[in-house]
Amino acid sequence: MQSIKNQYIIPNIVPASEAALMSDVYLVVLYATRIPPHLAVAVNGKLFTLTIKGATVDGELSALLKLIRRRNIDTIFIKLSVPPVFTLHQLHNEIRKYTLAYPRVDVGIATCLSPIKDFCAGVYEAQMQHVNYLFDLLPKLYERNVISSCSHLNLDRFLIADSFYLSKYNMNDIYEGIRSASYSAV
């Protein structure tokens, strides 16, 4: 919840219960130690994300969890509250709509954060004008009391007193990540 010069501190991270992840709403931070990490949203076991190949909607979180275990991917799961005016089914439809609004991740078009920003603005009424990175988004969500807990898989060696120090990055880092993913996909 606090920030130091080149890092954003995510506090109180506990080991994830894979069974618990299959319900509720989570912001998923894949490859948390990479610059930049990849972001997704899980709602009731369904996965939503935007990649260079396009939108993934209604993917299976269970399949991603198997991949995370098999490849030892450092991952953070940030549990988001369900606003009283929404059901989980409605949140599922909202993230689906926002994810499908983008053709793909591409330089100057969208990042994996783009549909998540739209979702958070629409559902949590969070101000997103100056949000370009995960470390911009998290303080807005904490401010609105949207984050109820944080858990992880494969991050034990990176935690300091149950906190994760997320390295800050810039748009050039994101664009470089997109370019490198595009080249490796060819």
Image (spheres, grey):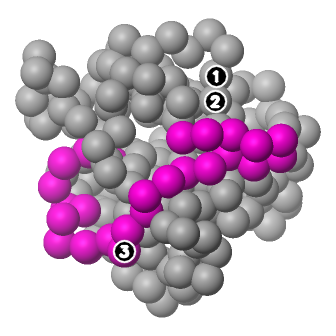
Q: Which residue is mark 2?
A: 136
Disc 1 to disc 2, C-alpha distance: 5 Å
Q: Which residue is mark 3?
A: 15
Specify start and end residues of the magenta stretch as a single range.
1-26
Label located before the other in sequence (1 or 2): 1
Amino acid under label 3?
A: Pro
* Disc 1 element: loop
Q: Is residue 110 magenta?
A: no
| Res 180 seen here | yes
Q: Residues within 10 Å of mark 2 (few under 14, many from 20)?
A: some
Q: Position of residue 8 (x, y in %)?
A: 68, 45
| Res 186 seen here | no
Viewer-nearest residue: 86 or 53: 86
Q: Is residue 105 above or below residue 30?
A: above
Circles 1 and 2 in contact, beta carbons < 8 Å: yes
Amino acid under label 2?
A: Asp
Q: Which residue is mark 1?
A: 131
